[in-house]
C-alpha cells in the first residue's frame, strides 16, 4: 500500500497532522494507499512556499511561463495510460474513459495556457483630451485550487492553465477520495520549486486553505454545501472565489427527434462515468407523443451498459466512488418507488464486492421525489412525460441548480427558446458539445464566477489603471 505525502517547495514532506486516511479501490474494496488527514500547519507551509515563489514566477515573461507549462503538459501526456489506471483504482472510472478525459485535460491545459500569448495584460488607449489611459492586469498572487474526486486529473489541469500562465502560484488540495493521480502529477512536475504545492487531506486541510489570509483566490469545485462554506470563508478573508458546485441538469426531448439515436445519447449522458459527472443528465423531460417509444429505447441502451472493474477492457461502467455514494443513489431510487415511480430496468444493488450499481431507468416520477430535485451523481435516468415542449422548458427551469442543460429538437423556434433555461451552458442536440472557446458562469446554486477563455484570465488577474495627463507645455 502506497504512502502519500504533501509536496511543498519542491520537496515531498510529511504532514504535521497526526491522523491518516485511506484510499479504497471501489471495485475491490481493498485499501491501495494511505495519506495524511491534513492540518492547518501543512497549509501554512504550502501557502508560504507559494507566496515566496510568486514574485520570481510572475517576473518571467509570459512566453517563458507558457513554454514551461506546455513542457510539463507534454510530460503528463506521455503518462496518460498510467494516470488513467490510477484514477480507476482510486475512484473506479473505466480506463478507456479515463484516457479520453485526461487527453482532453492535457489539451485544455495547453490551449488555455497559450491564450496568455494574446491576452491583454497591458493595454493603452488614447484619451479624447490627449492623455493616455493604461490598464494593466497583474497576477492576483497565490491561488488555492480544491478539486473533486470524479475527474481528479482533468479538473486539476483545467484550472491551472490561466492561473499559472498569468503569473500566479498555486496550492492544490485534491479530494480525499481520489488523491493518487494528483500525487502522480506532482511526481511528473517540471516547474520551479514552490510554483505548485500540494496539500493532502479532508476538511482539516480544506477549511484552513479556503480561509487563509495569504490566499488571494480560491478555485473550488464540489458540492453546494461545501461551496457555501468556501464562499463564506472567502468573503471573510476578502479574497476572490470561483465556485463550480452541484447540478441537477435537465434534458428536454422534443417530439420531432430521432427517438432511438436520442435515447442512446441520453443514456450516454446519464451513465458515462457511472453518472458521476457534474453535468450528467439527471432530469429527462420527454414529449408525450414519443414518450413510450423513447423509454423502450432508453431501457435497451441502459441494459447495454455492463458494469464491473474498469481495468477490464469491455467494462462501460465502473463502480460508484464509495459505499456512501451508492447509498445516496439507492436511497433516491427507493424514495421514488415509495412515492409511485416505476423502475423499468436496474434499481437493485448487485451482490458481491465493490460499490456497483446498474444503469437504471425510472418513470412516473415527479418533483416531490428526491431523484428529481437533489443531485444524484449516479447512473439513474428518471423520465418525466410532458405535454409540450413549452411544458418541458418550464419543468427544466424549475430547479435551485443551474449548471448545464441539454435540448434535443429539430424545431428552430424551440431551439431558440433553449437559451432561456437558467444555466451556465445549454447544449442543443449534442451533450458536451462545442469547443474550448466557451465562456460560462453557473446559475443559481450551481456556483459563481465565470470561467473559460479570457474570463479565466480576468479572474486570475487584478486590473489597475494608470492615467497619464496630456502634455500642456
Image (tube, grey):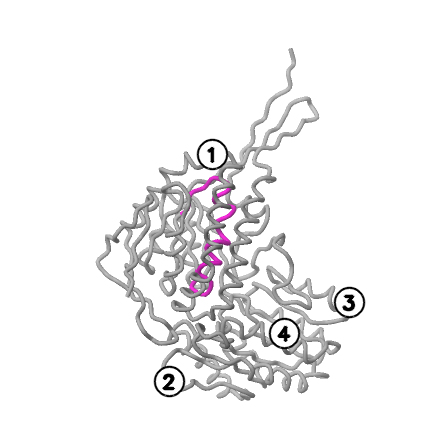
Q: Earlier in the sequence, mark 3 or mark 1?
A: 1
Left or right: where does residue 357 sit relative to residue 293?
A: left
Disc 2 designates what residue?
A: 352
The magenta span reads 148-170
Q: Earlier in the sequence, mark 2 or mark 1?
A: 1
Helix, strand or loop at disc 2?
loop
Q: Position of residue 468 (x, y in %)?
A: 59, 23
Q: Residues within 10 Å of mark 3 (few under 14, many from 20)?
A: few
Disc 4 designates what residue?
A: 265
Q: Where is 132 relative to 378, above or below?
A: above
Q: Residues within 10 Å of mark 2 (few under 14, many from 20)?
A: few
In the image, what residue occupies the spot 48% across and 45% down?
71
Q: Residues within 10 Å of mark 1 (few under 14, many from 20)?
A: few
Disc 1 designates what residue?
A: 60
Q: Where is 59 relative to 28, above or below?
A: above
Helix, strand or loop at disc 3?
helix
Q: Earlier in the sequence, mark 2 or mark 3?
A: 2
Per the model, the C-alpha gap separating discs 4 and 1 is 46 Å
Q: Which quadrant would residue 300 be assigned to in this image?
A: bottom right
In the image, what residue occupies the spot 33% across and 43% down?
9
Q: Residues within 10 Å of mark 4 (few under 14, many from 20)?
A: some
Per the model, the C-alpha gap separating discs 4 and 3 is 22 Å
Disc 3 designates what residue?
A: 413
Q: Position of residue 453 (x, y in %)?
A: 59, 48
- Classified by dominant secondary structure, the portion drawn in magenta counts as helix
Amino acid at each position: 500500500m502506497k504512502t502519500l505525502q504533501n509536496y511543498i517547495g519542491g520537496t515531498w514532506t510529511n504532514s504535521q497532522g497526526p491522523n491518516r486516511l485511506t484510499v479504497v479501490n471501489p471495485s475491490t474494496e481493498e485499501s491501495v494507499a494511505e495519506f495524511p488527514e491534513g492540518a492547518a500547519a501543512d497549509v501554512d507551509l504550502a501557502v508560504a512556499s507559494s507566496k515566496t515563489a510568486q514574485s520570481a514566477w510572475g517576473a518571467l515573461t509570459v512566453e517563458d511561463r507558457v513554454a514551461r507549462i506546455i513542457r510539463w503538459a507534454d510530460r503528463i501526456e506521455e503518462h496518460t495510460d498510467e494516470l488513467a489506471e490510477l484514477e480507476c483504482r482510486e475512484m473506479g472510472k473505466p480506463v478507456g474513459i479515463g484516457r479520453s478525459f485526461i487527453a482532453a485535460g492535457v489539451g485544455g491545459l495547453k490551449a488555455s495556457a497559450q491564450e496568455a500569448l494574446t491576452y491583454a495584460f497591458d493595454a493603452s488607449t488614447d484619451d479624447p483630451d490627449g492623455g493616455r489611459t493604461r490598464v494593466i492586469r497583474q497576477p492576483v498572487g497565490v491561488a488555492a485550487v480544491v478539486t473533486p474526486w470524479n475527474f481528479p486529473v482533468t479538473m486539476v489541469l483545467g484550472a491551472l492553465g490561466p492561473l499559472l500562465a498569468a503569473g500566479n502560484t498555486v496550492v492544490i488540495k485534491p479530494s480525499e477520495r481520489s488523491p493518487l493521480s494528483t500525487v502522480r502529477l506532482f511526481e511528473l512536475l517540471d516547474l520551479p520549486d514552490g510554483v505548485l504545492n500540494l496539500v493532502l487531506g479532508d476538511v482539516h486541510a480544506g477549511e484552513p486553505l479556503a480561509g487563509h489570509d495569504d490566499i488571494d483566490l480560491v478555485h473550488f469545485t464540489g458540492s453546494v454545501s461545501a461551496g457555501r462554506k468556501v464562499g463564506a470563508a472567502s468573503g471573510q478573508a476578502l479574497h476572490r472565489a470561483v465556485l463550480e458546485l452541484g447540478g441537477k441538469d435537465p434534458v428536454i426531448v422534443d417530439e420531432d427527434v430521432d427517438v432511438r439515436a436520442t435515447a442512446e445519447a441520453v443514456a450516454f449522458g446519464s451513465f458515462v462515468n457511472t453518472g458521476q459527472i457534474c453535468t450528467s443528465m439527471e432530469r429527462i423531460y420527454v414529449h408525450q407523443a414519443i414518450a413510450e417509444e423513447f423509454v423502450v429505447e432508453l431501457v435497451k441502451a441502459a441494459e447495454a451498459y455492463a458494469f464491473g472493474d474498469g481495468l477490464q477492457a469491455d467494462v462501460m461502467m465502473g463502480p460508484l466512488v464509495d459505499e456512501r455514494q451508492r447509498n445516496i443513489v439507492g436511497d433516491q431510487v427507493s424514495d421514488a418507488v415509495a412515492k409511485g415511480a416505476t423502475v423499468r430496468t436496474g434499481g437493485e444493488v448487485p451482490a458481491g464486492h465493490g460499490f456497483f450499481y446498474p444503469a437504471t431507468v425510472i418513470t412516473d416520477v415527479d418533483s416531490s421525489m428526491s431523484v428529481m430535485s437533489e443531485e444524484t451523481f449516479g447512473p439513474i435516468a428518471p423520465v418525466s412525460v410532458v405535454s409540450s415542449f413549452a411544458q418541458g422548458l418550464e419543468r427544466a427551469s424549475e430547479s435551485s441548480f443551474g449548471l448545464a442543460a441539454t435540448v434535443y429538437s429539430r424545431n428552430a423556434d424551440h431551439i431558440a427558446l433553449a437559451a432561456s433555461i437558467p444555466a451556465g451552458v445549454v447544449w442543443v442536440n449534442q451533450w458536451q458539445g462545442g469547443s474550448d472557446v466557451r465562456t460560462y458562469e453557473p446559475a443559481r446554486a450551481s456556483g459563481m464566477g465565470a470561467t473559460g477563455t479570457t474570463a479565466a484570465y480576468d479572474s486570475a488577474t487584478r486590473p489597475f489603471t494608470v492615467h497619464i495627463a496630456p502634455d500642456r507645455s
